[in-house]
Every structure is written in structure tokens, then in C-alpha cells.
Image: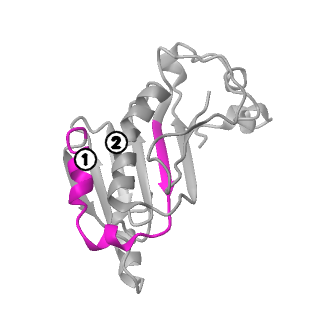
Amino acid sequence: MSASASVNPTGPKEWVDDLPFPEFPRILYDKNPLELVICQLRFPPILKIEADLPSGFQEAVRSQFPLFNDARPTAGGVGLPPELSKLLGAMLPTPMPRTYEFTSADSMWQITLTRESLALTCRKYKRWEEFRHILQVPFSSLLENYAPSFFSRIGLRYRDMICRSELNLANVPWNELLRAELAGEFHSPIADNIAIAN
């Protein structure tokens, strides 16, 4: 089952369920393979977010997300060595946008706020209802404090990490565990030579 949140900026500030996909039986795994789940809402740039510290936003989320970090991402992006990222950042004429991070005490949940996006990252995903409940507070605070004109993109991304040995499936071939639509490389002649697939 999938769900998305949308809002009419001129109407009531509340969730609207939209289920564009057919219903499927829900399966809850004892050992959840989800390593990371991120929901990002993008909107036209709001300069107020970058100009002032988001104190009102923080007050709304602080009970769930007490840790705060005022960060500037490096120009090189994720995955590059810090030295190379720093060098690339120094070569660019314009500074990278300011990023505010609000993290839960156990570091399993994090809100990232920039002038053009709000994201919720979960490192211990259980089910959609919990994720949606936790997203509700920063989402409402975004609407109350910054009132974006509209959302240009709402994305939900999942990252799985499956370790066959932890599931007692070390001797089961990948092509019996993953469908070809999801991981076609494991259904090809080179499947036996693949060590890591992203």
C-alpha cells in the first residue's frame, strides 16, 4: 500500500490521503531489509529559511528532534573524500545553501530543512503509519512557519540492505529472492560474478 501527503496552501492545513495504486496484501517482515527511508518535499525557494535561524520551526519539533546542527553541505556531494569535497567547494563561486538538521536523541530519525526542501530520514523503519505520524509535526510546522506556495515534488525513497547470511539464506541464489524487474543483473549470465549491487 502506498500513500502520499498533499496540501492545498490556500485551504486547510491537513493531510490528504491519495492512494493512486491498487491495494496489495501488506507483508510485515520480522527482519526488515529497509536500511533507510527518506521522504522529501520540494518547494520554490523561501529565502526566509536561509536568512534567519528556524527557531519557530525548531520549537515545534524539538520534543521529538532535540539535536540541532546548522550545516553547509559540501559542493562535492555525498561519497567523495572530504579533502576533494572541500577543494571543489572552494572552487565554486557561490556558496552552497544552508542546511538545518534536527535529529532524534537516538539518531534514528532526522529532519533536514533547506530553503527549498524538507526531508525526513528514518534509519529504523517499521511501517508507514509510524513514519507518517512522525512526518506530520515537521510538515505542519513548515506550513505554519513558512507557508510554501506549492510543492513541486514529493518523493519517497527506500534503500534496502539484504544480507542473505543473516536471513539463513546464504545458499539461495539471488534470482530466487529478487524479481527480475527489481534486480535484472541477478537474472543474467553474469549473476554469479556480482559481489555488490546498488
Tally of marks: 2
Tell me the CA gap for discs 2 and 1.
Answer: 7 Å
Classify mark 1: helix, strand or loop.
helix
The first of marks 2 and 1 along the sequence is 1
Quadrant (top left/top right/bottom left/bottom right) for the N terminus: top right
Quadrant (top left/top right/bottom left/bottom right) for the C terminus: top right
Let me know if residue 96 is in the magenta part. no
Residue drawn at point x = 52 percent, y = 16 percent = 29
Label placed on residue 142:
none
Residue designated by label 2 = 137
Q: Is residue 121 above or below residue 92?
A: above
Could you say where residue 134 lies in the image, as x and y percent from the top left?
36, 36
Residue drawn at point x = 23 percent, y = 52 percent = 58
Could you say where residue 80 lies in the image, as x and y percent from the top left?
43, 62
Residue designated by label 1 = 60
Q: Is residue 173 above or below residue 60?
A: above
Q: Is residue 128 left or right of residue 194?
A: left
Crowding near pointer 1: few (<14 within 10 Å), some, many (20+)?
some
Q: Is residue 149 left or right of residue 173?
A: left
Residues shaded magenta: 36-64
